[in-house]
Image (cartoon, rainbow, N blue to C red):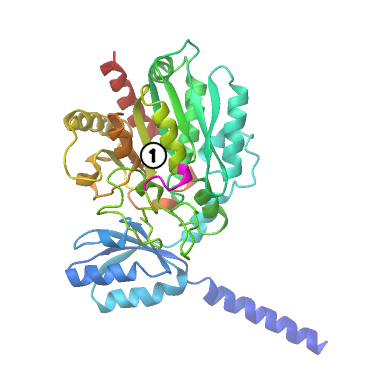
Amino acid sequence: MRPLLLLAVLICFHCILRKCFCTSEQDKVLFIIAATQEQASLLQNISSHNETVLWQPASPSHIAVKTPVHLYIQSSSVSQITELLRAHQFSFRVMLENTQQLIQEQIRNDTTDPKSGGMTYERYHSLEDIYHLVNITSQEHPDMTKLILIGSSFEKNPLYVLKLSGRRGPVDKAMWMDCGIHAREWISPAFCLWFIKFALTFYKQNADITTMLDEMDIYILPIMNPDGYKYTWTTNRMWRKNRSVREGSSCVGVDLNRNFDANWCTRGASSNPCSDIYCGQYPESEPEVQAVTKFLRSHKDSVKIYFSIHSYSQMLLFPYSYTHEEIPNHTELYELVQEAALKIRRHYRNQYRYGSGAKTIYLAPGGSDDWAYDQGITYSFTFELQDLGRYGFLLPPNLISSACNEAFAAVKTIALRVLEKLQ
């Protein structure tokens, strides 16, 4: 009995150690402000560490004096980095500390039958479930939908666009919306799925969605970066890029929103394959970007409105992001996003910043909305959905509905106003 007793004691001791030490420190997100250039430089170095992930801004190169920084830190480095920040007299606080719990909440419905219940569109879904939902939707609504395969990803996952139309004859106007270009921004594909469900459910019941579907076709790409998205479910929740591999580089992935042929790889993008804002080997080097650009080029005479849905930071943006110069219809688009932000504030009491990308955030060349605008789609927008950083990329499922309602308010406000202009 003594060996068994000893084994039991050892097991109990291991459990106590595990409870006390192994789970005492979780991954954390810190809110940090650099007060001096020296601190900004140090923070750039810290955020380049492989056990940290920069949530905001998108790249260490964008960190500047008095710029709020949201930094995700793995548990093994939390003590070391916080001690370093204190030693250099940084102003910082813990923004999020229950990261593992939030991730578990987000993936809790991974094994749930996607066909069950009315809450299907108010939870996050794996890539496989998204494919199932899109396919079953096209089968259940053959009179209003058409499933279009526009290409495949680097890992050969299909890129499906769902075309939504009213029950009417052909029209000459269309709207495009893509979601999930950055893998970790889960609220983005959740909104595309929510929008599809809302449009099909409330057609001929809700006046705004009825007008939109009666007067134009709506093309929706629910997940533009399927490889990266799948990787966030299986391996690294904080992954941003796609999963393309290049010979001669040990680093994986390209930032698809730096890969479009819009002042490609200039200031605000990186030629370093290890960077989160790596622009790729050349414009449209990535199959995901090639698929989207090929489709939009072939439909640019009909596509009048372009939306790209991102998170987080609650912003309604329009071109340009690759230069501070104003587009010819800057005032017109400014008034559109201003009206949309006002609608959100009035109905949902939430604040959204708005303006051109470069002036509102920072320079970001190679972006999809700038490319679309330069192709002649002059009503081109990028939305950053909830929230402002309370949860960041880990927005809980119970906030999906409010985030989607706000996004829809902005989409319909702009779309209906543009339709009026195109009469």
Q: Is residue 261 magenta?
A: no
Residue 282 on image: x %, y %: 37, 50
Query: What secondary structure prevails in the magenta region?
Result: loop
Residue 344 appears in view: no
Quadrant where the image shows the C terminus: top left
Which residue is farthest bottom?
2
Side of 260 relative to 35 (left or right): right
Residue at horizontal 41 percent and vertical 36 percent from the top: 293
Quadrant where the image shows the N terminus: bottom right
Q: Is residue 219 above or below residue 281?
A: above
Query: Tag 1: Cα neighbours inside 10 Å, few (<14), some, or many (≥20)?
Result: many
Q: Is residue 192 above or below residue 109?
A: above
Q: Nearest the camera: 93 or 53?
A: 53
Residue at horizontal 44 percent and vertical 31 percent from the top: 295
Q: Nearest the camera: 372 or 410?
A: 372
Residue 373 on image: x %, y %: 29, 33
Q: How many marks do you count on the picture?
A: 1
Q: Nearest the camera: 178 or 335?
A: 178
Q: Secondary structure at mark 1?
A: strand
Q: What's under tag 1, amino acid-wise?
A: Ile
Q: Is residue 407 above or below residue 168?
A: below
Residue at horizontal 58 percent and vertical 75 percent from the top: 18
* Residue carrying label 1: 309
Residue 360 on image: x %, y %: 22, 45
Q: Which residues are magenta?
A: 283-288
Determine which quarter of the picture holds residue 410: top left
Residue 96 appears in view: yes
Which residue is farthest top?
169
Residue 354 on image: x %, y %: 24, 39
Determine which quarter of the picture holds residue 67: bottom left
Q: Nearest the camera: 19 or 197?
A: 197
